[in-house]
């Protein structure tokens, strides 16, 4: 192959290299360094509907309120994920279907989830109420964090404990969005 002296060819190679690096980084499934998923973890107790109490802002959820995540078992043993939120600007509900699988031991709350075919991202339960009433989930890096609960409000004292743990994991907790779960008008 001749050397890459042709500028358009060099640019193409550069774009492909950067694109591949971003694709790999965007599909990370391990938890951030120094962060561990909870053990023991019981998937059957985790299944069902969770309300998103707080999250960091990302394009795929921007502007959504009343966000919930419902987890159920698929026939193949993987987890069906249905995320749903209300977009007030459009006056409509938005849904995303996904699939999650454990990254290792099923007794550890570390999964990978995909909403786009073969591309997976990390989903690591790093805090969990013993009665499965609330949970905190981090992605592959501290820019992805969700606080979930079975009810729209956290029990007294839990919010502060979760914020302290999130900050210790490197999350900028000042950027958390506290999700509105008030009833829709009318």
Image (tube, rainbow, N blue to C red):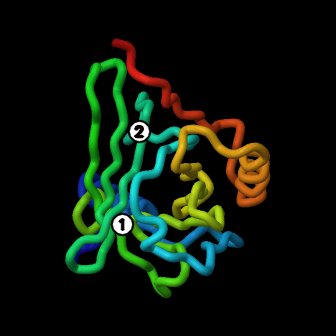
Instruction: Give the x, y percent position of residue 148.
Output: 54, 50
Q: From the viewer's perspective, tell me whether residue 37 is left or right of residue 105.
A: right
Q: Which mark is residue 120?
A: 1
The residue beneath circle 2 is 61
- The reply to whether residue 79 is visible in this rendering is yes
Q: CA distance from mark 1 to mark 2?
A: 17 Å
State whether residue 152 is above or below residue 50: above
Front residue of 63/83: it is 83
In the rendered image, which quarter is residue 84 located in? top left
Q: Is residue 163 left or right of residue 51?
A: right
* Image quarter hosting the N terminus: bottom left
Q: Are marks 1 and 2 in contact (CB under 8 Å)?
A: no
Q: Can you give x and y, in whole percent of width and height, for residue 66 in the image?
A: 43, 33
Does residue 20 show up? no
Q: Tell me if mark 1 has few (under 14), some (14-19) or many (20+) residues whose alpha carbon lies within 10 angstroms of its own.
A: many
Coordinates of residue 35 in the picture (x, y in percent): 67, 70
Q: Viewer-nearest of labels 1 and 2?
A: 2
């Amino acid at each position: 192959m001749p050397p890459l002296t042709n500028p358009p060819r060099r640019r193409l190679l550069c774009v492909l290299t950067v694109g591949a690096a971003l694709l790999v980084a965007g599909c990370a499934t391990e938890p951030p360094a120094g962060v561990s998923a909870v053990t023991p973890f019981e998937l059957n107790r985790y299944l069902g509907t969770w309300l998103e109490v707080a999250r960091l802002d990302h394009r795929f959820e921007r502007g959504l309120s009343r966000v919930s995540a419902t987890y159920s078992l698929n026939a193949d043993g993987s987890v069906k994920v249905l995320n749903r939120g209300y977009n007030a600007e459009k006056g409509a509900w938005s849904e995303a279907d996904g699939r999650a699988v454990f990254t290792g031991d099923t007794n550890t709350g570390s999964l990978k989830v995909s909403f786009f075919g073969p591309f997976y991202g990390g989903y690591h339960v790093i805090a969990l109420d013993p009665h499965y009433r609330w949970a905190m989930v981090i992605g592959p890096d501290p820019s992805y964090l969700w606080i979930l609960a079975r009810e729209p409000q956290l029990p007294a004292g839990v919010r502060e404990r979760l914020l302290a743990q999130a900050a210790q994991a490197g999350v900028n907790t000042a950027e958390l969005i506290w999700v509105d779960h008030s009833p829709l008008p009318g």
